Amino acid sequence: MLETLDAAAVRRWCDGGLEALRAHQREIDELNVYPVPDGDTGTNLVLTLTAAHEALTAAHEALAAAQEAAGPAERGALAGVMRRMARGALLGARGNSGVIVSQILRGMADTFAGAVAVRGSELARALRTATDAAYAAVARPVEGTVLSVVAAAAEGAGRIKSDNLVTVARAAARAASEALARTPQQLPVLAQAGVVDAGGRGLCLLLDALVDAIATDGSPDIPAVPGIRPESVTPEVSAVPGIRPESVTPEVPAVPGTRLESVTPEVSAVPGIRPEPAAHDALTVPGVRPEPVATEVMAVPGVGSEPIAPEALAAPGVRPEGVAPAGQGTPASPGMPAGEGVSDEPCAPAGQEPWGGGAGAGEPVSGGAMGTGGEPHGCAGFGYEVQFLIDAEEVAVRRLRETLGGLGDSLVIVGTGDGEPPTWNVHVHVTEIGPAIEAGIAAGKPYRINVTPLEDRRAGGDRRGAVVVAAGDGLTALFEAEGAVVVDRNPSTAEMLAAVAATGAASVVLLPNDANTHAVAVSAAREAETTGVRVSVVPTRSPVQALAALAVRDGQRPFAEDVIAMAEAAGACRSGEVCTAQRDALTVAGQCRAGDLLGLVDGEVHVIGEDLAEVSRRLLDRMLGGGGELVTLVLGADTPPGFEEELRGHVHRTWPFIELQCFAGGQPHYHLLAGVE
């Protein structure tokens, strides 16, 4: 049994914690109380701790050498291991739960860094600091979540009048388990579903693993019911996660259709500083999504103060505009010849602080296949951006793609192929305007032609960039045509940082497009600030809001004012979506069963049905009933033939004065994304 915590025990803790989370990953995922498909808590916690484990493994030899010394050197080894674990978790954090756990580890690392020896009292102090850091990571703390569990662990550790390391750790784990069992009493939505908080369940497993790591006498500290210690089971609430507590009666009416994982910070607080008590009084109900407010993230030293070199930020899942692996082209989208890709260096209009994209990006057009052609040197030598809509047959568009590919760079042609003839959006950078327009005339009928002078992209300076989280070839093509770097859904902090670096810009806006990704975006923004990049987060909840935000940006405005304008545009866009229910649940619209189609407006279920077209029509009617002028529809990967025409016909018949634009997004899980402005 250890008297003081050492580096080897921290590594055992990380190993054991990751093993426990993997063993209970599915169980924690199933504690999700919301029926829509989303990044599940168990998976996010496993990915977060996997990143922490990999960070420790990579530095094992150096840490082992430092461990050979005694006294102060050993203390340094412990601090180094804990800091690497915390920083690895931060860079790999996924979802709200992953970000909060990374901040808990960071708070503990900060305490251990200043301790001569870590005994019971230092562990209790570390848990208090961890609680402060966790609460500071959330703009609106909600009790009945992982925050309540870590706060209870710190309080339980502080009550023990002992300096024994194992005794204090066991007290913290016991108090956490008791707090976990109380979460259904604090959040009616948990009681309604008969489950405990998923993030809190994961934290209990981590605290159990800490006890096992330091209790080296071999005595097991694992209770009969995984994650819940027998002495912590209260007679009022069943302590088995995922099993409906028979005697739980919510004292407050349940709020159906809400999701715990959607609690996201709107304005990031400074890590390590507990919010004023008033912040704890203003609790929000999970799943209720406030209007977007632009988050200007200030420079805050993260875990580890060393700057992150941009070249070290490459991460899987990040899709910088046009950047392809060495010797390869950008992966081809449907309708695009293999080996073609967006150019490495897209240009920006002259007279603007370069954003990429250009005039006419918000014009109505059907979205779909993307075709590009380019040179490795991007816009070098290309003086104009030409963009237009064209009605042409697909065979003519293929010839147009080949012609424009030989004339210029940053070529993107987007269209669904629907219509007689189909409508396409064409974007290209060229040295001469005339041949590009003539190629369009030869292919069909070009209109809404926009020509913008370009200037070469320069490193640093006042150039601006955008990072967008999105999935689906069509959505990726749309955002890349706007000059944004696209990151796949449910990214880690490291992947967001890599995307920020890939913009090469001095000022960057992040558009997370998901409440569960907002916390990761804020965490990445803090880290990016330490490298000298100015980063703001516009808390978009859907890709349609990101499209609205990007449409109003203006490089001639100061960056802060432009971010505010983007946030206002996103907030003015009501978002809707149609997806398939993943589980039985009680929602605002009534009981839904797994496999039902759900129509959601701003995150709340409003329509339940079995026919995709009917649910989509009812959803649009519900959204347009509150007013609107422009409707944006983004079709999913599995929408049936004729679906777009059916929705267009319904909108034109029922809402004749509405302007409608439709894109083939190709996104998974969501059959339809809708925006009303």
Image (tube, rainbow, N blue to C red):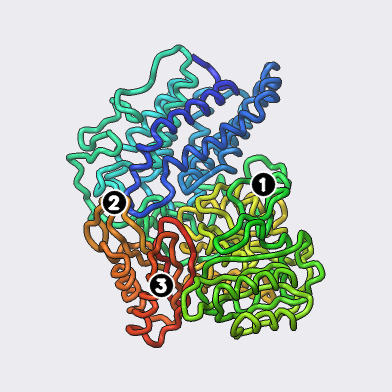
Does the CB distance between marks 2 and 1 fall below 8 Å? no
In this figure, which residue is indicated by the disc labeled 2? 189
Residue 314 badge: 1
How far separated are the C-alphas under marks 3 and 2? 36 Å
Where does the image place residue 159, in percent across and percent down from the top left?
40, 29
- Compared across the picture, whether 410 is left or right of 210 comes to right
In this figure, which residue is indicated by the disc labeled 3? 644
For mark 1, does the 10 Å Cα neighbourhood hold few (<14), some (14 to 19), or many (20 or more) residues? some
Task: State which tag comes first along the sequence, 3 or 2.
Answer: 2
Front in this rendered view, residue 250 or 474: 474
Quarter of the image holding residue 161?
top left
Residue shown at the point (38%, 71%) measured from the top left: 642
Q: Tell me the SS state at disc 1.
A: loop
Does the CB distance between marks 3 and 2 fall below 8 Å? no
Where does the image place residue 629, in percent across and percent down from the top left?
44, 82
Q: Of the residues shown, which amino acid type is indicated by label 1?
A: Ala
Q: Tell me the SS state at disc 3.
A: helix
Q: Of the residues shown, which amino acid type is indicated by label 2?
A: Val
Q: Tell me the SS state at disc 2.
A: helix
